[in-house]
Image: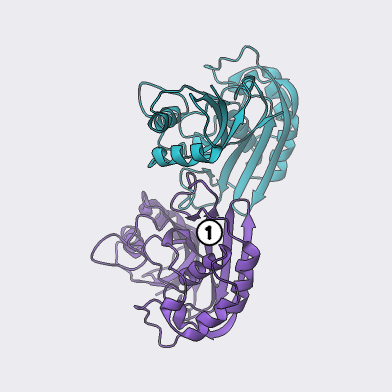
Chain colours: A purple, B cyan
């Protein structure tokens, strides 16, 4: 059975998250349903990184084994036809060998977190940003982010329901930039703990607004205690932007 | 009565357009309603440029005369509170003198038109872009746009219901740029005819896809006939980005 690597964009707003759940519609559900309509056969899909309810993806990746071979563009266009009217769209498909696994073959993931930093709430960017009306100091946030780069025990930034075997993770890069009213936090690592990006952003917001000094990040890391860090930033500002493979 | 210049952002998707109409909810309606709740008194508002149904604004401007004076930030925050849950948000307020008129004092308007140019339709940018799946040549579109800059009779780009006294308009600048999958058309003029931007973009799309050569713009201008130009690009890609004053 040929295996395909598929890249997908979605608006997380109407979904219970990536993964199938009993209490609502998931991104996985609507994609599997669209493949069923396309192939007349149910094929399970395997994702690079599950996203929570309300979290978006610009470049999520999954793999699927199909009963027969199709041109990649046919898969993209046919499945997109069946995905309507859901805000989910396949961007690319590529036949890969049987060793490829969307989750286990990934060597890095890039997440972006968008903060709308102005007095007025979002109109055009509703459900796409976290609105913070206090002025945030991007340079201080970057200084805080620099302390997070490298290998650390991220227990203080880990959700209680996180299933990772180890709290030790390595952040490759963490860049904070401002484009007019929008602050974009871009972080890259091989993998992340559950809620890690949102917990780091909620903590950097405390630094940006001047409540904490950037160096407090060291204390928070050493505390190994979730209550030492800032709030969990809301899901609607978070995007899984890219998954990288060899 | 103090006069205020107000800048507002809105998502045009759920509205019948800026102006009050019998058949649905307009942006003007919800703003006048929010001012009524704030001031306990009805104040008419005067806009820089009416937008059609589905057209967005990043920086629309209107003016309003209020019965008494308020700090600008109070107006912004109080009216925004009453604007909920509509996707309309005041960005700024400024007290201006009685000669100021949002429409007649404007010296230039900048519109932007967003085209999503890729095989796959929009998920995150749904209702925010015109999706064109044929590859568009941005350099050719820019060459076409260059013919439109300057003073011309824009009859070929004018909606039949346009109420302007003259079809002669002067475009200051018209820039086309690509940012990954998005083509942004940015055009500046003192004023525009009804549907002028959407008709120019629909025509540049014909050039971008190679159906017409850029120099055909000259023939279209000289034809002074709406049917000589391309289609009217759909409203959801259009943004009133900025209104400029002395």
Residue B183 lies left or right of residue A101; in this view the side is right
| Quarter-of-image position of residue A152 | bottom right
Expressed as whole percent of the image width and height from the top left, the position of residue A233 reads 45, 64
- Residue at position x 64%, y 19% in the image: B99
Of residues B12 and B174, the one nearer the viewer is B12
Which residue is under mark 1?
Answer: A114
Residue A208 lies left or right of residue A16; in this view the side is right
- Residue at position x 36%, y 53% in the image: A82
- Residue at position x 57%, y 22% in the image: B194
Expressed as whole percent of the image width and height from the top left, the position of residue A63 reads 43, 71
How many marks do you count on the picture? 1
Expressed as whole percent of the image width and height from the top left, the position of residue A11 reads 43, 56
- Quadrant of the frame with the C terminus of chain B: top right
Helix, strand or loop under label 1: strand
Of residues B98 and B61, the one nearer the viewer is B98
Expressed as whole percent of the image width and height from the top left, the position of residue A178 reads 63, 57
Please say if B189 is above or below A80: above
The chain that hosts pointer 1 is A
| Quarter-of-image position of residue B169 | top right
């Amino acid at each position: 059975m040929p295996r395909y690597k598929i890249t997908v964009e979605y608006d997380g707003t109407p979904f219970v998250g990536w993964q199938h759940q009993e209490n609502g519609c998931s991104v996985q559900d609507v994609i599997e349903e669209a493949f069923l309509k396309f192939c007349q056969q149910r094929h399970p899909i395997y994702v690079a990184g599950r996203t929570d309810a309300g979290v978006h993806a610009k470049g999520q990746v999954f793999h699927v084994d199909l009963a027969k071979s199709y041109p990649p563009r046919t898969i993209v266009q046919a499945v997109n036809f069946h995905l309507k009217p859901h805000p989910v769209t396949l961007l690319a498909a590529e036949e890969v060998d049987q060793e490829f696994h969307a989750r286990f073959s990934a060597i890095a993931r890039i997440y972006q977190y968008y903060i709308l930093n102005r007095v007025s709430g979002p109109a055009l960017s509703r459900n796409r940003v976290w609105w913070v009306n206090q002025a945030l100091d991007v340079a201080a946030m970057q200084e805080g982010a620099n302390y997070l780069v490298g290998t650390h025990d991220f227990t203080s930034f880990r959700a209680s329901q996180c299933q990772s075997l180890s709290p030790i993770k390595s952040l490759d890069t963490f860049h904070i930039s401002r484009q007019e009213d929008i602050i974009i936090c871009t972080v890259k690592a091989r993998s992340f703990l559950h809620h890690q990006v949102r917990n780091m952003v909620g903590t950097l917001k405390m630094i940006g607004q001047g409540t904490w000094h950037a160096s407090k990040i060291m204390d928070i890391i050493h505390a190994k205690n979730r209550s030492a860090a800032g709030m969990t930033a809301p899901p609607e500002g978070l995007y899984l932007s890219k998954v990288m493979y060899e």
